[in-house]
Image: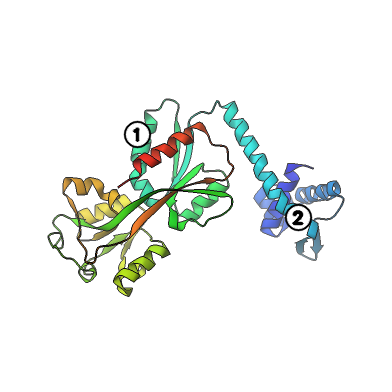
């Protein structure tokens, strides 16, 4: 039995057609058909019923697909381990960062990596769903993202890294900056700037402040680049809603101020370090994990 034959069957099972599977595998349909036939000859039974233009897995085919997912994954890990040994475990790190972690980790990580001889760092930003696909396809070694956006699965290791306080932030000259008591009604007189918020955070805001706090209505300036949102609040009367640590430099030098809401905002951001279960970890990733734990803080 050939690992390639199993990979081809998985592609066919996932796409549902020979043409789409062949495109995904970058082979011809005839080559894919021969591969499936070879697999059936090795097993001595059919794995696929061809019914007109439809292809359906036989009971044996369903069993083979379930087992093949583990076999193909383990084979990929063996190849990955071999590459690590061949390369001498060089310091290569390929990571995905969510909007909050990127604002807190990107610059320190690149600066730290530049001082490490032989270390190579590749950082990707984007929606958690896209990064999850990249992680599962082994384009990424790890992700640091909003824990509330990660759906638990048996093939994932999800490690809670930090829970950071959130708040409303304005420039020091903002009309609300000097107020000792600010309500959400006061806040809503100005544009609110934020990253896309999880459903869990949205429910928390609505529970605490009422329907008017629903992010879909409350947030008028929305993007994934936290630094741009903070700068917008620093230059205009817009109010930044997000992790306070991402505005740390402005809060420390007094150019930004946290609004004192009544009642106080109870929301926090929970960040997780996500890797594939069972995957061999490159030596550089141990360094990265500790780096995240050290720098992801209020």
As drawn, is 219 to the left or to the right of 119?
A: left
Q: Nearer the viewer, mark 2 or mark 1?
A: 2
Q: How many marks?
A: 2
Mark 1 Cα shell of 10 Å, populated few (<14), some (14-19), many (≥20): few
As drawn, is 44 to the left or to the right of 167?
A: right
The residue pinned by badge 1 equals 111
Task: Return the x and y of residue 212 as percentages of the image width and height.
Answer: 30, 73
At a point 73% along the width and 56% down the height, the residue shown is 18
Tell me the element at label 2: helix
Mark 2 Cα shell of 10 Å, populated few (<14), some (14-19), many (≥20): few
Tell me the element at label 1: helix
Task: Return the x and y of residue 222 as percentages of the image width and height.
Answer: 34, 60
Q: Quadrant of residue 237?
A: bottom left
Q: Earlier in the sequence, mark 2 or mark 1?
A: 2
Task: Tell which of 128 and 26 is nearer to you.
Answer: 128
Task: Tell which of 202 and 90 is nearer to you.
Answer: 202
Q: Is residue 18 in view?
A: yes
Residue 240 position (above or below residue 190): above
Task: Tell which of 139 and 283 is nearer to you.
Answer: 283
Q: Is residue 26 in view?
A: no
At a point 71% along the width and 49% down the height, the residue shown is 68
The residue pinned by badge 2 equals 63
Task: Return the x and y of residue 54 as percentages of the image width and height.
Answer: 76, 64
Residue 237 position (above or below residue 30): below
As drawn, is 247 to the left or to the right of 287?
A: left
| Residue at mark 2 to residue at mark 1: CA–CA distance | 49 Å
Looking at the rendered image, the quarter that the N terminus falls into is top right
Task: Return the x and y of residue 271 as percentages of the image width and height.
Answer: 40, 51
At a point 62% along the width and 39% down the height, the residue shown is 77
């Amino acid at each position: 039995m050939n690992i390639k034959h199993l990979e081809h069957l998985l592609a066919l099972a996932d796409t549902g057609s020979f043409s789409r599977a062949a495109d995904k595998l970058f082979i011809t349909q005839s080559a894919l058909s021969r591969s499936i036939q070879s697999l059936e000859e090795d097993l001595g039974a059919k794995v696929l019923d061809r019914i007109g233009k439809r292809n359906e897995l036989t009971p044996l085919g369903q069993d083979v697909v379930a087992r093949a997912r583990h076999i193909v994954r383990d084979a990929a890990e063996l190849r990955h381990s071999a590459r690590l040994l061949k390369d001498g475990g060089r310091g290569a790190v390929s990571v995905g960062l969510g909007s909050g972690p990127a604002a807190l980790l990107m610059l320190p990580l690149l600066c730290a990596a530049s001082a490490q001889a032989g270390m190579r760092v590749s950082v990707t930003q984007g929606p958690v769903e896209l990064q999850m696909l990249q992680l599962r396809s082994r384009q990424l070694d790890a992700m640091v993202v909003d824990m509330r956006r990660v759906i638990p699965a048996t093939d994932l290791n999800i490690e809670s890294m930090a829970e950071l306080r959130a708040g409303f932030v304005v420039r020091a000259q903002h009309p609300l900056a000097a107020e000792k008591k600010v309500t959400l009604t006061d806040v809503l007189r100005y544009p609110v700037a934020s990253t896309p918020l999880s459903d869990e955070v949205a429910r928390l805001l609505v529970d605490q402040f009422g329907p008017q706090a629903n992010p879909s209505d409350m947030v008028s300036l929305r993007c994934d680049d936290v630094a741009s949102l903070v700068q917008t609040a620093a230059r205009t009367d817009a109010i930044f809603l997000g992790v306070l640590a991402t505005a740390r430099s402005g809060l420390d030098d007094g150019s930004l101020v946290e609004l004192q809401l009544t009642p106080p905002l109870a929301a926090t951001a929970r960040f997780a370090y996500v890797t594939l279960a069972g995957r061999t970890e490159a030596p550089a990733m141990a360094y990265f994990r500790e780096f995240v734990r050290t720098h992801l803080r209020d």
